Image (cartoon, rainbow, N blue to C red):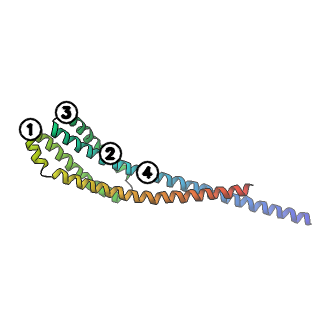
């Protein structure tokens, strides 16, 4: 009778350990999934920040090259201006895709797109003025500070977007670290049960 009780107790303990092991394995699987999802969000948010910076760099490069052309008349500057200007729509499109789930960023992008288009139009006008009426007329246009004011607005809009994404990135990084800790804890618990 004692052997029978001992055998039943062993079976009960074994069954309990098996159930516990299955539960830990399920927790490990879930925590691993959460960790991977958090890592994806961190990468995506980092991508939004990088693409937002790329947008500003394209606008800044087009403005810098426009100035170089206005001052020197060199076709090299004009070519660089056109290349940078032509990159802007593609970067804007990519940024719109990356932030498609964020209504606030979409609204900011809409406002920013309008100002960027005004800046592109202003640069094209100033270049045309330079080519048709000469340096002095282009200089007068630059002295209206319209282009400078548009760049200040663009810089502020980009700054808002990046600041928002950096806050989100910090939150997502903490979530990823917490998910990683839970995953490692579940793996350790499973390891203890196996041995």
Circle nearer the viewer, 4 or 1 = 1
Q: Earlier in the sequence, mark 3 or mark 1?
A: 3
Q: CA distance from mark 3 to mark 1?
A: 15 Å
Q: Nearer the viewer, mark 3 or mark 1?
A: 3
Please provide percent x and percent y for residue 147. Answer: 18, 50
**Of residues 66 and 107, the one drawn nearer to the viewer in this rendering:** 66
Does residue 113 sit above or below 131 in this rendering?
Answer: below
Question: Where 13 falls versus 158 (above or below)?
Answer: below
Q: Nearer the viewer, residue 40 or 166?
A: 166
- Crowdedness near tag 2: few (<14), some (14–19) or many (≥20) residues, C-alpha within 10 Å: some
Where's the N terminus, which quadrant? Answer: bottom right
| Number of the label disc, if any, that sits on residue 75 | 3
Residue position marked by numbered label 1 in the rendering: 132
**Front of the two marks 1 and 2:** 1
- In this view, the residue farthest toward the front is 72
Residue 2 percent location from the top left of the image: 91, 66
Upstream in sequence: badge 2 or badge 3: 3
Outermost right residue: 1
- Left or right of 169, for residue 2: right
The answer to whether residue 35 is above or below residue 63 is below
Percent across and percent down for residue 21 are 70, 58
Q: Circle 4 sits on which residue? A: 44
Which class describes the residues within 10 Å of circle 3: few (<14), some (14-19), or many (20+)? few
Looking at the image, tell me whether mark 1 or mark 2 is earlier in sequence order. Answer: 2
Q: Which mark is residue 91?
A: 2
Along the horizontal axis of the image, is 195 left or right of 154?
right
Q: Tell me which residue sits at (79%, 63%) in the image.
A: 12
Residues at marks 4 and 1, CA–CA distance in whole angstroms: 46 Å
Under tag 1, what secondary structure?
helix
Using residue 187 as the reference point, say whether residue 143 is left or right of it: left
Which label's residue is closer to the chain start, 4 or 1?
4
């Amino acid at each position: 009778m004692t052997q029978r009780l001992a055998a039943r107790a062993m079976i009960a303990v074994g069954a309990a350990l098996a159930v516990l092991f299955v539960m830990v394995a399920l927790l490990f699987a879930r925590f691993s999934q959460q960790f991977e999802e958090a890592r994806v969000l961190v990468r995506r948010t980092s991508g939004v920040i990088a693409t937002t910076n790329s947008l500003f760099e394209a606008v800044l490069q087009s403005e810098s090259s426009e100035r170089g052309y206005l001052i020197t008349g060199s076709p090299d500057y004009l070519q660089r201006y056109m290349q940078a200007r032509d990159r802007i729509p593609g970067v804007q499109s990519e940024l719109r895709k990356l932030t498609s789930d964020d209504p606030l960023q979409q609204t900011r992008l809409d406002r920013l797109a309008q100002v960027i288009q005004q800046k592109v139009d202003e640069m094209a006008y100033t270049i045309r003025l330079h080519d048709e009426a000469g340096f002095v007329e282009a200089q007068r246009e630059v002295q209206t500070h319209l282009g400078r004011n548009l760049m200040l607005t663009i810089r502020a809009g980009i700054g808002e977007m990046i600041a928002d994404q950096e806050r989100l990135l910090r939150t997502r990084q903490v979530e990823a670290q917490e998910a990683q800790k839970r995953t490692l804890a579940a793996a350790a618990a499973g390891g203890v049960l196996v041995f």
